[in-house]
Structure formats: C-alpha cells, structure tokens
Amino acid sequence: MAKRHLALAVAIAALLIVLSAPVQALLAPPVLLCNMTQAGLEACELAVTARKKIPATPPPACCAALAEADLACLCAFKRNNLSLLKYLKIDPRLASKLPARCRLASPPKC
C-alpha cells in the first residue's frame, strides 16, 4: 500500500512539474545581450549569417532592435567571442556593417 501511495505521489509531482513549465517560461525574464532581446537577435540573423544571399536591407525589426541596443557592448562581445560567432555561423564583418546598413552610427573601431 505504501508503495502505491509513493508511486501516486511521484506521478502527481511529475505532472505538476510538467504543467508548471509553461508558466515558468512566461514568468522568466527575456534573454538579453547588450540590451537586445532574443527576438531582436533572431530578427537580425539573416543579415549577419554567412549565407549565399544576404538581404539588401536588414529587416525593419532588426534595425529597430539594433537602435535600442548597446552598440559598444555588441562590438566588445564580437571582439571577445569570435569562436562563438563562428560556431553560430555569424560573420563578424557582416555584423560590423549592420549598424550602417540600418542607418545607425557605429561605434569607433568596431
């Protein structure tokens, strides 16, 4: 009988954990990198990844996110994380040109 109660308690606990995961995701703070949210970073993905065809202009959502970003922080992140950028297939040269392509002032020596 005790084993049955224990199994039932474990099953209920597991169910509560599974059901609470979406709530925790909603309450979790958004991922930020240099004041850019994950959505902002994703909006810029096509403009900075090494692909055969790069869009002529970055998506408006990308430029809007970049306008709110800490560009000096992004430049420092780029300089200090080249291997991570390579792993993520982000071209640092394209990333450096992105502010100008969005008609934003680039930090010096970026």
Image (spheres, rainbow, N blue to C red):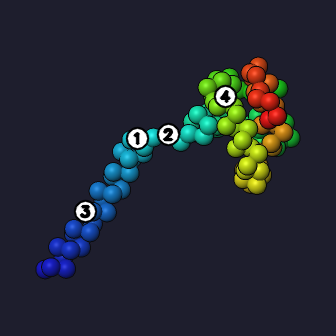
What residue did someone put label 3 on? Answer: 12
Amino acid at circle 3: Ile
Given the image, on which type of amino acid does mark 4 rest?
A: Leu
**Image quadrant assignment for residue 48:** top right
Q: Quick one: label 4 or label 1, which is nearer the N terminus?
A: 1
Q: Nearer the viewer, residue 90 or 99?
A: 99
Q: Which residue in the structure is indicated by mark 4?
A: 66
Residue identifier under label 1: 26
For the C terminus, the image quarter is top right
The spot of residue 55 in percent (x, y) is 80, 30
Residue 34 placement, left or right of 82: left
Question: Measuring 69% from the left and 31% from the top, which residue is drawn there?
Answer: 71
Image disc number at residue 30:
2
Q: At numbered mark 1, what does the secondary structure look like: helix, strand or loop?
A: helix
Question: Of callouts 4 and 2, which one flags the residue occurring earlier in the amino acid sequence?
Answer: 2
The kind of secondary structure element at disc 4 is helix
The CA distance from mark 1 to mark 3 is 22 Å
> Which SS class for mark 2?
loop
Q: Of all residues shown, which one is farthest toward the right?
A: 52
Looking at the rendered image, the disc whose residue lies closer to the viewer, 4 or 3, is: 4
Q: Position of residue 49 (x, y in %)?
A: 77, 42
Q: Is residue 49 above or below residue 61?
A: below
Q: CA distance from mark 1 to mark 2?
A: 9 Å
Give the answer, above or below, for where 51 lies relative to 44.
below
Whole-number angstrom distance, CA of label 4 to CA of label 2: 16 Å
| For marks 2 and 3 on the same chain, the one whose residue lies earlier in the sequence | 3
